Image (spheres, grey):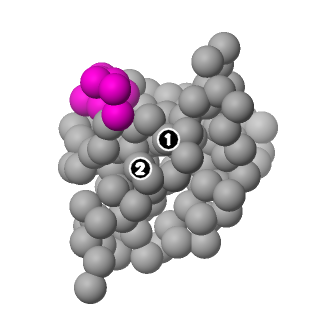
Amino acid sequence: MATIRDVVQALGRHEGVETVVVLGRDGLAIDSFSRDGLDSDGVAALVPSFVKACAKLGEVGIRGEFNAGVMEYGDGFVVVSVLSADALMAIVVRSGTNVGGLLYELRRYRTAIAELL
C-alpha cells in the first residue's frame, strides 16, 4: 500500500516540479519533497493564509468551497489543493511546465491522497 511519502515523491518526479508539500492547516509540513534547496517549510507556512483568503473570496463571490488554485509568477506556478478539512498540498513548478496533467491527477486522486494521512 502506498504511503503519503510515496505520493509526495511520485509527484516530485513530474517534469518541472520543484517542491511538493503536504501540510496541516497550521502551516506545518507533514511531508515534503524539494529540489534545489527550495524552502518547503517556508512554502508550508504561507499556504494556510492563502487558502483562507481564497475561501473567503469564494464565500463573497458565492462560488462555494475552495478546492484548488493555481498562482502564476514570473518564474513558474504554485498549485494549492485542499486534501481534507485538516490537510493541504502545495506544488511549486518551473515556468514553462504544463500544469494541466498535474491538476487532473490532483483532482482525480485527492480523496485517495487524503485517506493516506
Q: Which quadrant of the figure contains the C terminus?
A: bottom left
How many marks the image carries: the answer is 2
Relative to 1, residue 75 above or below: above
Residue shown at 72% from the left, 52% from the top: 100
Give the number of the disc on residue 12. 2
Q: Quadrant of the N terminus?
A: bottom left
Residue 25 visible in image: no
Q: Secondary structure at mark 2?
A: helix
Quarter where residue 11 is shown: bottom left
Q: In the image, is residue 87 part of the stretch drawn in magenta?
A: no
Of helix, strand and loop, which one carries label 1?
strand
Q: Which residue is mark 1?
A: 17
Q: Residue at x 67, y 46 (%)?
A: 99
Verify CB contact (< 8 Å) between mark 1 and mark 2.
Answer: yes
- Which span of residues is magenta-colored? 35-44
Amino acid beneath label 2 = Gly
**3D distance between C-alphas at marks 1 and 2:** 6 Å
Lower sequence index among marks 1 and 2: 2
Query: Could you say where residue 53 lies in the image, as x and y percent from the top left?
Result: 55, 29
Pinpoint residue 16: horizontal percent, then vertical percent: 55, 39
Residue sitting nearer the eye, 1 or 114: 1
Q: Residues within 10 Å of mark 1 (few under 14, many from 20)?
A: many
Tell me where residue 109 appears, x and y as whole percent: 52, 72
**From the viewer's perspective, is residue 72 above or below residue 89?**
above
Identify whether 42 is placed above or below 104. above
Q: Is residue 102 visible?
A: yes
As drawn, 75 above or below 12: above
| Residue at (30, 44) in percent of width and height | 33
Which residue shows up at 45% across the image and 41% down it?
Answer: 90
Which residue sits furthest top? 74
Q: Amino acid at mark 1?
A: Val
Left or right, 64 with reference to 45: right
